């Protein structure tokens, strides 16, 4: 099948979908600026605003709930059930985002007491929840909060950690190109988002790497994490609850191992490039050729 993928809001995930579709055996043009007419796509998948593409095609697929309901499209795809607007009456399907289970895979078990949190330094990511939680966890536990400066600078986050008295146990490396080295040295992964997320790449990468995940109970994450099975859920912003979970999982190796195995298996079964590629292929074939 010939597919064009365009993006006006999330280039990273749009590009990843293009890779998934290529591996599924389709011909794909990503963000085309030429050769569109000769390509003659069967379908155009749009992240964000629908792009007008010359030539005929069967269907447009718009992915994002908040933007898609404001624009006309033939069909809509949401990344999880939480993103589907209440009483949504248009044609839609739910297909999760994929994670590269070959790139993010378990390595040798880390004996460190290091926590890893990934995400830009923005209040919505809830990194201050982790910093506050560090005041109640064992002194031997350290944390790495990796993400590019956004609303906060590294200096501002470091100052907050100093105010909390835990600066000496938290590092802020900024934006990291390849996070595998950080994941491989971590024993626990944390996603402390304070609001709903369309998708949490950080959570999927942590789970696929076989690292026990402690995640906030927000939309998107609750669709991804099964409490007590593939991770542990805490109330958004509840740093005392998070601290208790950190102390518990750091000393309960049986639970940590169980969460790790279950999370990895979940990613391989439901979120791998192969699995998600088959879901897209089945949907597009139904739309275009039925």
Image (cartoon, rainbow, N blue to C red):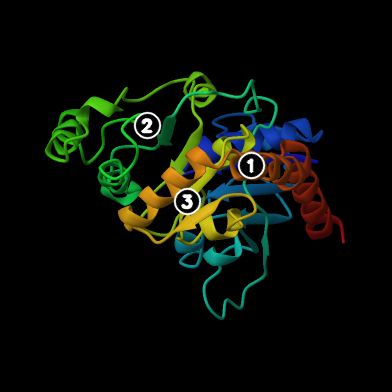
The reply, left or right, for residue 120 in relation to residue 223 is left
Residue 17 location, quadrant: top right
Q: Which residue is mark 3?
A: 215
Residue 223 location, quadrant: bottom right
> Who comes first in sequence, dot 2 or dot 1?
2
Residue 155 location, quadrant: top left
Location of residue 73 in the rendering, given as x and y in whole percent from the top left corner = 59, 62
Task: Name the residue furthest right.
Answer: 290
> Who comes first in sequence, dot 3 or dot 1?
3
Q: Which residue is mark 2?
A: 141
Task: Name the residue furthest bottom.
Answer: 87
Badge 2 density bin: few <14, some 14–19, many ≥20, Cα 10 Å: some
Q: Is residue 50 above or below residue 2?
A: below
Label annotation for residue 254: 1
The reply, left or right, for residue 10 in relation to residue 158 is right
Along the line of sight, the residue nearer the viewer: 129 or 152 = 129
Label annotation for residue 60: none
Q: Viewer-nearest of labels 3 and 2? A: 2
Q: CA gap, disc 3 to disc 1? A: 19 Å
| Residue for point 22% across, 34% down | 166
- The C terminus: image quadrant: bottom right
Along the line of sight, the residue nearer the viewer: 285 or 247 = 247
Can residue 62 be seen? no
| Residue for point 63% across, 36% down | 208
Q: Are marks 2 and 1 in contact (CB under 8 Å)?
A: no
SS label for mark 2:
loop
The reply, left or right, for residue 172 in relation to residue 200 is left
Q: Is residue 183 above or below residue 276?
A: above
Q: CA gap, disc 3 to disc 2? A: 18 Å
Can residue 32 be seen? yes
The reply, left or right, for residue 204 in relation to residue 165 is right
């Amino acid at each position: 099948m010939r597919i064009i993928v365009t993006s006006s809001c999330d280039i990273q995930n749009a590009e990843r979908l293009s890779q998934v579709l290529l591996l599924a055996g389709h011909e794909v043009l990503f963000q085309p600026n030429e050769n569109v007419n000769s390509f003659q796509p069967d379908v155009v998948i749009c992240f964000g605003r629908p792009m007008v593409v010359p030539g005929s095609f069967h269907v447009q697929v718009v992915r994002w709930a908040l933007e898609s309901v404001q624009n006309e499209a033939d069909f809509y795809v949401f990344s999880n059930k939480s993103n589907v607007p209440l009483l949504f009456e248009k044609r839609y399907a739910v297909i999760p985002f994929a994670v590269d289970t070959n790139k993010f895979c378990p390595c040798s078990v880390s004996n460190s007491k290091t926590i890893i949190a990934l995400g830009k330094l923005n209040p919505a990511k809830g990194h201050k929840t982790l910093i506050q939680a560090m005041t109640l966890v064992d002194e031997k536990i350290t944390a790495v909060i990796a993400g590019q400066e956004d609303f906060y600078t590294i200096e501002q986050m470091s100052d907050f950690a100093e105010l909390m008295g835990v600066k000496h146990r938290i590092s802020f490396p900024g934006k990291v190109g390849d996070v595998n080295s950080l994941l491989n040295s971590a024993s626990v992964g944390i996603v402390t988002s304070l609001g709903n997320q369309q998708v949490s790449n950080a959570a999927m990468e942590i789970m696929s790497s076989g690292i026990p995940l402690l995640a906030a109970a927000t939309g998107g994450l609750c669709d991804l994490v099964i409490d007590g099975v593939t991770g542990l859920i805490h109330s958004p912003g509840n740093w005392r609850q998070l601290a208790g979970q950190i102390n518990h999982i750091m000393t309960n190796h049986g639970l940590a191992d169980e969460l790790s195995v279950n999370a990895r298996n979940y990613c391989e079964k439901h979120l791998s490039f192969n699995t998600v590629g088959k879901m897209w292929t089945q949907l597009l074939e139904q739309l275009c050729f039925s």
